[in-house]
Image (tube, rainbow, N blue to C red):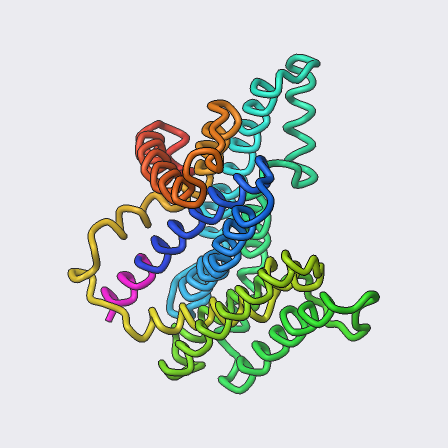
Amino acid sequence: MKEKRVAYFSELRAVSCVAIVIFHTFYCAARLFQPGGAPYLGTILVRNCLLWAVPCFVMVTGALLLNPEKRLGPDRVFGRYLPRAVGALLVFSFVFALFDFVVDAQPGGIPALLGSWVSAVLFNGSWLHMWYLYMLIAVYLMLPIYRVISRHCSDAELRYLLWLYAAFQALVPTINFFLQDGLGPYIFVYTVYPLYLFLGYAIHSERVRIPLGASIALVIAGTVGLLVATYFGIEGEIEALRSLSGSFSSVLVLMQAVGIFSIVHQLRTDAEKAPRVLPAIDKRSFGIYLLHVLVIYYIYRVLQMNPYQSGGLSMLAMLSAIVLVVTWAISWFLSHVPGIKKIV
């Protein structure tokens, strides 16, 4: 049983990692080159259909770290998990600030560079994917409390918590996309990510069971809903639909992520049957996440390669594969560098 759990966690993280690389390769191209028309629509359709990847990452984290049988005291949280996340935030925020400083030929010298770095760290002003580290740090800080909940709550209490989170962190935000002022009722939670954290634990521990057919239906309905909302949001210039189709707090993304996680959980393979490439990607997944936007920006901002002038979506797909391979190689190299290897 242990091998099966490890195998399907590894497979899901690896597939999610690949999806995130594709997500940002497409999305960064749309932001930087602003193609407009059908190329833009196609790019955002692909991007929005891959939003499930980050929630699935969080769900795997919840399945692993909220398991009451896992020995995880404050010494491990504050001695291993938090230092890695904080170290990654500090080191890579500086790397990205240095990249911007050099590529954009920013004035001010070293003081300006250091000021930009400190500001980026304090105010989440670094590159678009670095928000994940702030979320991860928050999860680690709350982990002792979350583990008390997972260890001592009954199945009914856990389901109550999930429904409460789903109502106020997915359903209410989805409704608010269509309202000018937003609904008044709220609970004292800030983001949707604890919902994904507890869902991963609940589904993995089978304290919440979703039949395979229902899981498949969730994925199909969520994906179709995202496609429709994205199309009419862009073509009809309906801001509510654009927001609905591009947010991790969207009910449609929640449906996708829950369905995919549940399907992989139920169809999990033995460790020896898993494709070898997936564990290799999973082993470098954190490094790939940290570094992949750097490779994307090098291609787009330094090499000035506009994929819409040489193949469009097919070129973006090819670039996604290149970014994945190059980033994996860099991450593998850095994993052998003293000091840095503890981060990536």
Quarter in which the C terminus is drawn: top left
239 over 202 or under it: above or below: above
Q: Indicate left or right for 135 with 15 as reference.
A: right
Percent of width and height locating residue 338 = 36, 28
Image: 40 above or below 73? above
Can residue 77 be seen in the rendering of this structure? yes
> Relative to the observer, which residue lies in front, 301 or 286?
301
Residue furthest to the left in view is: 272
**Residue visible at 60% across and 74% down in the picture:** 166
User: Residue drawn at (54%, 24%), measured in percent from left and top?
Assistant: 99
Residue 48 falls within the magenta-colored stretch:
no
* Number of numbered discs overlaid on the protein picture: 0
> Where residue 238 appears, x then y in whole percent?
70, 61
Asked if residue 4 is among those painted magenta in the image, a careful observer would answer: yes
Viewer-nearest residue: 308 or 20: 308
Of residue 237 and residue 252, the one placed in the foreground of this image is 237
As displayed, is residue 98 above or below residue 24? above
The residues colored magenta run: 1-10
Where's the N terminus, which quadrant? bottom left
Instruction: Spot the residue most to the bottom.
Output: 156
Residue name at image x 57 percent, y 18 percent: 102
Taken as a whole, is the magenta stretch helix, strand or loop? helix
Q: Position of residue 241 (x, y in %)?
A: 66, 64
Residue 323 placement, left or right of 268: right
State the image coordinates of residue 313 (x, y, percent, origin top left): 43, 45
Q: Is residue 287 visible?
A: no
